[in-house]
């Protein structure tokens, strides 16, 4: 307990030091809030549930800062923990350092409450955490096998490929399968579908559900759809995603597609750096959300096909390194006749392999022969 108090104090001092350089008002408040927190530590058990945590439980954050944060749309400790310091500093009109100190303090509180991983854990503990990871079936046994059992929580899975390669069909099918109970290969949860290309079709959900013998109404009710019209709107939705994940009890978030809006709006070479930076901050937030909320994020992406890559690799995903580093798993889709090929491109532990699947009225499905051989025909 004594040690704990010490480390707590070091963190608090960081916050106060960062603040005193620019805002004496916030620094005084931080100091006051810290004192109370330190005194309280003995009597007040550390909250263990997210709902029990208040933003003012964070050392260094008192009513004034809490109000600034609330005004900036940051309502919970989780919201703060996934914020980016650049954006936060602008929103609460502070330096980047103190914004970063608040974020670090919020993450520390989550760690102390066992809601976030410690900075260092032994590998056996890491393996234990991986066990809380859930998988959801894609609808095709072959594609599930490529993914070693389906899409994972705590990860960002990217499907990229040309127009018509089946990206949106995978997204539609996943929403249906995710709504099914865990014992049936689903998440037993709602899904959030962020549609930037205007290609979400509820009729298709209806069709996939009926073809799979499911109740279409309850499946349709489990999917929250948001049609997004421009890149700023997308960034705003992602900023508030934590709240929506809670509201819709979603374990699956789909962004179909992640880059098309930014790609269209930041067309000139001169704006490329700006675009990449905005994409980067959005993607970082997505990864943290996936880990902290134990949800699965699926993003779709296009292949590079701009004139300047005429001699480049047409099978390369758009978005460059920024996107490449953000996705835990990248799967390249290609249309070959009626069938689709999926290839695992990037993964920390999947073997490099590929597989075939198809798209039918059931959504993503196995090829006819494989289905029949599995049925013992
Ligand atoms: N109801 C359906 N039955 C069978 N195949 C379908 C159905 N709906 C769409 N498809 C197939 O999916 C393709 C579109 O794939 P889609 O996922 O929308 O592509 P993208 O990769 O551009 O998102 C169509 O060309 C068609 O082959
Ligand atoms: Mg599509």
Image (cartoon, helix red, strand yellow):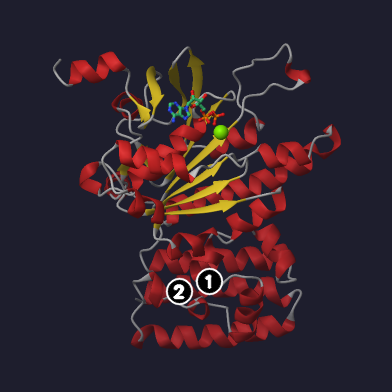
Label 2 with label 1: CB-CB less than 8 Å = yes
In this orientation, which residue lies closer to the viewer: 48 or 111?
Answer: 48
91 is higher (above) or lower (below) than 225: below
Q: In this view, does 287 lie above or below 322?
A: below
| The one of 237 and 35 positioned closer to us in this rendering | 237
Which disc, if any, is residue 6? 2
In the picture of the structure, the residue carrying the numbered disc 1 is: 10
Viewed as shown, does residue 63 lie left or right of 219?
right
Counting other residues with Cα less than 10 Å from the Cα at mark 2, is it few (<14), some (14-19), or many (20 or more)?
few
Q: In which quadrant of the rendered image does the N terminus lie? A: bottom left
Q: In this view, does 284 lie above or below 332?
A: below
Going 62% across and 44% down the picture, which residue do you hit? Answer: 196
Instruction: Label 2, secondary structure: give it.
Output: helix
Q: Work out whether residue 117 can be spotted.
A: no
Provide residue 31's location: percent of width, then percent of height: 60, 84
Residue 273 lies left or right of residue 114; in this view the side is: right
């Amino acid at each position: 307990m004594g040690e704990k108090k010490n480390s707590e104090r070091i963190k608090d001092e960081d916050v106060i030091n960062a603040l005193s350089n620019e805002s004496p008002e916030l620094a005084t408040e931080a100091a006051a809030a810290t004192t109370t927190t330190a005194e309280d530590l003995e009597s007040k058990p550390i909250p263990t549930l997210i709902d029990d945590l208040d933003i003012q439980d964070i050392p260094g954050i008192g009513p004034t800062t809490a109000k600034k944060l609330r005004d900036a749309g940051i309502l919970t400790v989780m919201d703060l923990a996934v914020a980016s310091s650049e954006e936060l500093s602008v929103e609460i009109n502070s330096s980047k350092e103190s914004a970063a100190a608040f974020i670090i303090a919020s993450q520390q509180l989550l760690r102390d409450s066992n809601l976030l991983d410690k900075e260092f854990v032994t590998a056996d503990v890491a393996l234990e955490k991986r066990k809380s990871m859930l998988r959801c079936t894609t609808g095709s046994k072959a594609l599930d096998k490529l993914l070693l059992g389906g899409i994972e929580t705590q990860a960002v899975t990217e499907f990229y490929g040309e127009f018509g390669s089946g990206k949106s069909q995978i997204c539609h099918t996943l929403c249906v399968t995710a709504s099914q109970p865990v014992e049936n290969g689903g998440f037993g949860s709602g899904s959030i579908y962020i549609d930037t290309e205007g290609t979400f079709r509820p009729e298709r959900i209806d069709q996939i559900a009926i073809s799979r013998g499911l109740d279409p109404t309850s499946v349709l009710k489990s999917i929250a759809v948001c049609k997004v019209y421009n890149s700023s709107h997308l960034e705003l939705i992602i900023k508030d995603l934590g709240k929506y994940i809670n509201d819709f009890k979603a374990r699956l978030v789909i962004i179909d597609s992640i880059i098309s809006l930014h790609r269209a709006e930041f067309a000139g070479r001169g704006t490329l750096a700006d675009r990449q930076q905005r994409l980067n901050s959005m993607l970082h937030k997505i990864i943290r959300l996936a880990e902290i909320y134990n949800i699965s994020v699926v993003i779709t992406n296009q292949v590079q096909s701009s004139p300047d890559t005429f001699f480049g690799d047409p099978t390369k995903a758009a978005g460059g390194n920024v996107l490449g580093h953000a996705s835990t798993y990248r799967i390249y889709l290609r249309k070959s006749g009626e069938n689709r090929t999926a290839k695992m491109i990037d993964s920390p532990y999947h073997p490099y392999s590929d597989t075939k699947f198809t798209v039918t009225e059931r959504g993503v499905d196995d090829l006819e022969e494989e289905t029949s051989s599995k049925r013992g025909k």
